[in-house]
Image: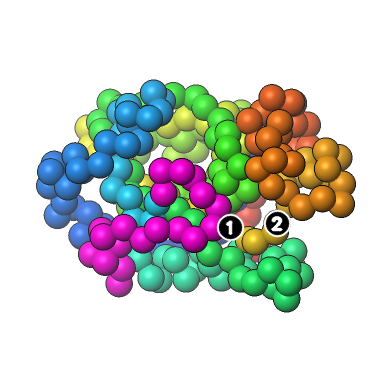
Amino acid sequence: MNFQGNFNRISTVDIAPLKNLVLQLTPLHWADDTTRQNRYEVHQDTQTIGLVYDEDFRHTNPTRRPPLELFGPELQPILAVTADHFESRPEAQSLFGTHGHGYFIRASLVRLAPGGKILPHQDKNFSLAHSHRVHVPVVTNDKVTFTVGSETIKMKEGEVIEINNRRWHSVSNDGQDDRVHLILDWVTPAEPCCCSYKLHPGIPCSPQACIESDRLKIECNCFPDDHSAMTPSQD
C-alpha cells in the first residue's frame, strides 16, 4: 500500500516466544518451500516458511498453511497488535458496516542468510498494491539495513513496522547471523488505492480497474518521496 512516507512504526511487541521457536528450526524446515526464491530473482537469497499464503496472490479467502499451527500461540499477540492498529483507523471503521472487518491475507517467516541481499524492487500486483505490508524482525543483527525510497534504517527485534511497498525497497544482511522477519499483509476490505480517485472515480478498486497502476505501467505521484523520517505510530 502506498502512503506518505517510507516506514510507519506501529508498535513494539515481545518477540522472545516466537524467536525461541524460530531458533529451533532446522535447515530442512527452511528448505521445504522454495516458491519465493524461485519465482522472484530478487528473493533468491531468502528462504520462506509460508503461514498464510496462496500462490495466485488472491485478495480474499486466504489459505492457512500447516506451519501456522506450530507458530499460532506465539503469533497471536503480534497479530492482535497489528490488527488493532489498522482496525482503529477512521478510514477503516467507515468501511466496516458495508464491507466488514479486515484480515491478514498473507503471513510468512522469511530468512535472509548472512551476506544475503534482497535487491531493489517494487511490489506490483493487485493484492500487494492494496495490502498493508508489515515487517516484524524476529532475529536480526546490527549489520542488517532496510531501505525504502530514500531512507535506510536498522529495524530492531520486536518492532512492528509497515513499509511502503510501492516504493523501491531493498534489504542487505552484512552480518554473520541470519535475519528472520515475520512478514504480514493486512487487507482492509474496499480500501481504495491512492490512484483510484483520479483513474476510476466512483468505481471500486478491482484487478481490472487498477491494472495499469498496480503494475506501475503509469507513474504514480500521489505521495512523492519527501525524504521524511519514519512516521511515528498514532497508537
What's the residue type where badge 1 is placed?
Answer: Val
Name the element at disc 1. strand
Q: Main secondary structure of the magenta part?
A: loop
Q: Which residues are magenta?
A: 54-73
The relative height of residue 220 versus residue 13 in the rendered view (above or below) is: above
Q: Is residue 174 left or right of residue 9?
A: left
Could you tell me if the residues under marks 2 and 1 are in contact, i.e. CB atoms within 8 Å? yes
Query: Label 2, on which residue?
Result: 191
Query: Which residue is found at the position 58% from the left and 58% from the top?
Result: 187
Q: Which residue shows up at 78% across the image and 40% down it?
A: 195
Looking at the image, residue 48 sits to the left or right of residue 166; the answer is left
Task: Please give the label number shown on residue 187.
Answer: 1
Q: Is residue 53 visible?
A: yes
* Residue 171 percent location from the top left of the image: 42, 31
Tell which residue pokes out farthest to the front in this image: 208
In x, y percent, where is residue 193? 72, 47
Q: Quadrant of the N terminus?
A: top right
Badge 2 element: loop
- 50 in the magenta segment: no
Left/right of residue 15 with respect to residue 192 in the rendered view: left
